[in-house]
Every structure is written in C-alpha cells, then in structure tokens.
Image: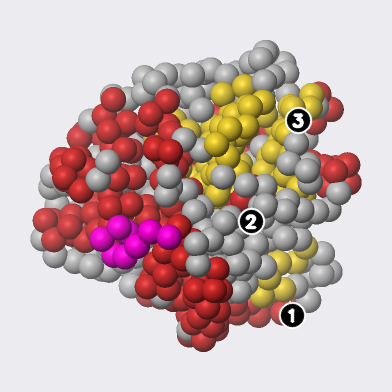
Amino acid sequence: MNVLRINVTTGSIVEEPTPERYSGLGGRGLTSAIISDLVPADCDPLGEDNLLIFAPGLLSGTPLANSGRLSIGAKSPLTGGIKESNVGGTMATALARHGISAVIVTGKAQEGALYHLVINSDGKASLIPCPESRGVRNYALAEQLLETYGEKNAISSIGPAGEMMLASASIQTTDPSGTPSRAAGRGGLGAVMGSKGLKALVVSKEGGTTQSMTDPDTFKEASKRFASAITKDGWSGQVLPQFGTASIIASTNASGALPTRNASQGSFDGTDKIDGDTMAATIRRRGGKTTHKGCSQCVINCSNVYVDEGGKPITSALEYETMWAMGPMICNDDLDAIARLDFLCDDIGLDTMNTGTAIAVVMDAKYIDFGDAQAAIALVESIAEDTEMGRLIGEGPNAVGEKLGHTRIPTVKGQSIAGYDPRAMPGMGVTYATSPMGADHTAGFVGGAKGPTEMLTNISKSSQAHAAALDCTGVCMFAQSGGLDTIFTAITALTGKPFGNNEWQKLGTNCLAAEVDFNHRAGLTDKDDQLPAMFHEEALAPFHEAVPYAETDLHGTFAALKQTDGK
C-alpha cells in the first residue's frame, strides 16, 4: 500500500510506499499517528502546516462486509486539538482498491485557487483547477462531477461552509447511489479542506489493486462467517434495515436521556411524531426506501431515502443524531422540516449536530422561538448566503453563545454533545469530557452505566480504546454483531501476524495515546476535559439529577499504557 502526498502550494504529487513505522495501521490509527508525527501541535488549523489526511481502514477494500469506513484527520479548527472524523459511503473502498493507504494533503493553495483532486481508473492523480465550482453546493457538485468523470467514481467534497472555512463545516462523501449524503461532520474538517483550496476528491471505483493476503482461504471463510452473523442478528439484521438508527429515539426519550430544548429537559412531548416507527411508516406510505445501502460492501442497509408527499426525495438518510439535533433539541416535531434541515446541512456542508445545537443556543437566548422550524431552516440557509448570523451559526454553539452573551452551551472543547444527556447517562458524560475528540459518542459509547466516577472512567477508557481500534479497521460499529474474534481472524489472515484481544487493546490504546499527547502539545489541559457547568448545576427534568463535579483524567492512563505496552 502506498501514501499519496499532494502539495497544493506547489502542485506536486508524489506516491511512495507507506513508511514501515505505520505498518499495521489504517484509518484513525494512521491519521492520528501521521498528524502526531508531522503536524506542529501549535499550528494554525487553517494554515499551511496542518495536514488533511484521507485514510481507508486496514480492512477496507477487502471482501469483508461493512469494512468501507473512511477516516479523515487533521488538527481541528473547532476543538484546537487532533481530530478524526469517520464517514461511510464509497471513498474508503475506492482508495483501497488503488492501493492507497492515505492521501495526505499538505500546504495551502494560493488565495482564490480551487482544485479538484482526481484519481482515475489507472491510479493517476491530477490536481485540476475548478474556478467554476466555487460556491457550488454538494448535491449539484456531485451531479456535475459524475457527469464529467463518470458514474463509477467516489466523491468527497465541501460545500459553501467549507469554502468559508466555518468551524462546523463537514466533508460530504457519496453513497453507492452517487448522492453526497454521508457526512464526516465532526470537528470542522471541511474548513481544513477549504483552507487547502480543495473542493473535491474524485476517485475512480475501478481500481484493480487488491491487498496481498497471507492466507486468502481463511480470510474468505472469515468473511462469509462475518456477513452471515451480521444478517442473522436481531439488531443489525432486522431492526436497522427497517428503522435505521431512528429506532432508538423512543427508548432514549422514555429513559429521560434525550437532550431537549437545548438540553434543559430529558424528554420531548413530540417524540411519537418523529420516532423510528413514524419515520418508517411515512417513508413507506410515500414510496421512499426504508432499506437503503449507504456504504460500500454493506450488508445491513440501515440508510433510508425520505421523500415528500409526491414521492420526491428530500434527504438520505435520516439518522438518530440528526433527528435529535434538528428535532427535540430545538423542540421541532415536524418530520418533513427535520428532513429538510438534514438535506440543507449535507448540501451546504455542515455538521448537523453542531449546527442544530447552535440553533438551540439561539433559541435558548430567546432570539427565535423554540419549535419554529421555518426559522431554523432560514438560519441554515443564511449560512450559504454568508450573512452575519449565518456565519455565526456556522462557527458553532460556542461562537453563538459568546456573541449573544448566553452561557448554556452543551459542548466540550467547542464540539456539541450528541443525543444522550450526561445527567441520564453519566458514563457518556465521562466520554464527552475526556475524549481527545471533544464531545463525541462514537469515540466511546458507554450507555446507561451508573456508579462511582472511577468505575465510569474505567468503562469509558475501555470503550474509547475499543472505538479507536475499530476505527483503525474501517469496520462499521453496527457490524460488530459479526463477531470481534472473526475480525481478529481476518486481520491475521491479511497480515500473517497473530492478532487477538491483546493486539486489539494495544492498537486502540496507542491511537489514543498519540491523540492525547498531541492535544497536550497543542495547549489543551485537564480543564478542557470537563463538562460545561450547566450539566453540574441543573437537574434534568423529569427524572435525573445534575452531574456531581468530579475529576476524570485519562491522560496519565493512556500515556503510561503507551510506554509499557506499545511503540
């Protein structure tokens, strides 16, 4: 596997073997290691010294089901620390089939320059000036690029928010249908892509390179076993294809853990109008799709296509976090409006969670009313229109709170929480506070565990290491029902090196240790590893008390494990 280095300052393109020190790494493990090694921790995230890295997982491009996750890494303009944003779609598989372990974008384009980076079916990479693409939104851009380069291409692109280098800007990736509906939303990495003058990465899906396997027969058998287990599992094989991640809205609400009204409540009266059952019934009645493939090699098909009353697609796909952020968080029970907000964020190129929370802060500050869906839609549209309020929303909840003088801001390291309130799920609060990534549920989901802080910290630590290891492989978190031991078998068959639980823990721990070390060098301290005061000072109606103040520190733990257990 090779690394492709693109210098947008000079226009040079160099392909070279992946350095030996990164052997056995993929995805988040690779992006974090390279950033930790090569990016000055104190650099300007939007300056020429930052790197933007696209890395398929270790198992991406192989026959293993659900192994098409892509890691995008950089120093974050939102958190000020290291960031990996994970996305599905088709890009990871396309890159891996060209034998590319990472695309590393360096430098900074001259002011006003804008490029498409195109990798054709022969694997040749070209930087192509594209002044005509300036300001074009993601859906129109994908359509234009697929018409120009052919349907058999994967695209990762930014919309106007990325060009404006807003801190909530996403990088959108096309799904197998060719729509840019899969979002690397967290951390503002779309702004880093915009700072590089890179509008889109276009990669042919017809690359012929396959990873050499030490034991292809064992890998093939493991792949069959993995896919079979996924499709037979009740959650991944039945619930997710019918209802997607929206299936958990009702249960989260019932437990009082659904952040509502800018996280001032834990349940939402309008849940039955937007939950998974209602969404699926609406999609079926209107002729949309409840079962849809969002990512390469997926056997779960948890995506959907939500359509209007006339059967015209509004968005793909409606998922739990977006439905929470654009629904209960702003007291909006209009499913069509939630779908419209999701589409606009994908089209303009925005993190739905950070954007929804920014709108919630505006509403909490009484600038517009909670529940006013049309005002929320207008706010998101104003981002693309480059208005003063639009830019403020696009910079995220902290910027909104500072400008409006409002202190109820549910973020950690500048990044909004996800759809699980830490007063109802205190273990999630530990992950929000201590993850190197900022508040992020996918960085270490803890669920409903409750108990002493030390116990919750240990659970979170283990979950964060597991999540990091999974992100290294390119395997979807929903595919874990296929069996972790089977993933171990596949890695062993691929690399020829014994791989088991000890290696898995080391992989995740070393990744986290590199990230924590970078954040320390970037100036983040233990004070940044705390929940905001609102979660400590306010009870959560109707069931839960405020979170007691407590110190939770993973820094020393991960640093010690790195020194004793791995390189």
Mark 2 Cα shell of 10 Å, populated few (<14), some (14-19), many (≥20): some
In the image, residue 124 sits, relative to residue 61, either above or below, namely above
Tag on residue 481?
none
Q: Residue at x 69, y 38 (%)?
A: 201
* Distance from Cα at disc 1 to Cα at disc 3: 46 Å
Q: Amino acid at mark 1?
A: Arg
Would you call the spot at circle 3 few (<14 residues within 10 Å), some (14-19), or many (20 or more)?
some
Q: Residue at x 84, y 27 (%)?
A: 132
Occupied quadrant, residue 500: bottom left
* Disc 1: which residue: 285
Residue receiving disc 3: 126
Q: Relative to 56, say whether 421 is above or below.
A: below
432 part of magenta stretch: no
Whole-percent x, y for residue 112 in the image: 72, 16
Amino acid marked by disc 2: Thr
Q: Nearer the viewer, residue 443 or 151?
A: 151
Q: CA distance from mark 2 to mark 3?
A: 22 Å
Query: Callout 2: helix, strand or loop?
Result: loop
Task: Name the spot of residue 415 as percent of width and height, x first.
Answer: 41, 41
Q: Is residue 428 visible?
A: no
Q: CA distance from mark 2 to mark 1?
A: 43 Å
Could you say whether the residue bearing mark 1 is in a helix, strand or loop? Answer: helix
Magenta stretch in the rendered image: 496-504
* Residue 215 image offset from top left, x and y in percent: 50, 67
Q: Is residue 500 magenta?
A: yes
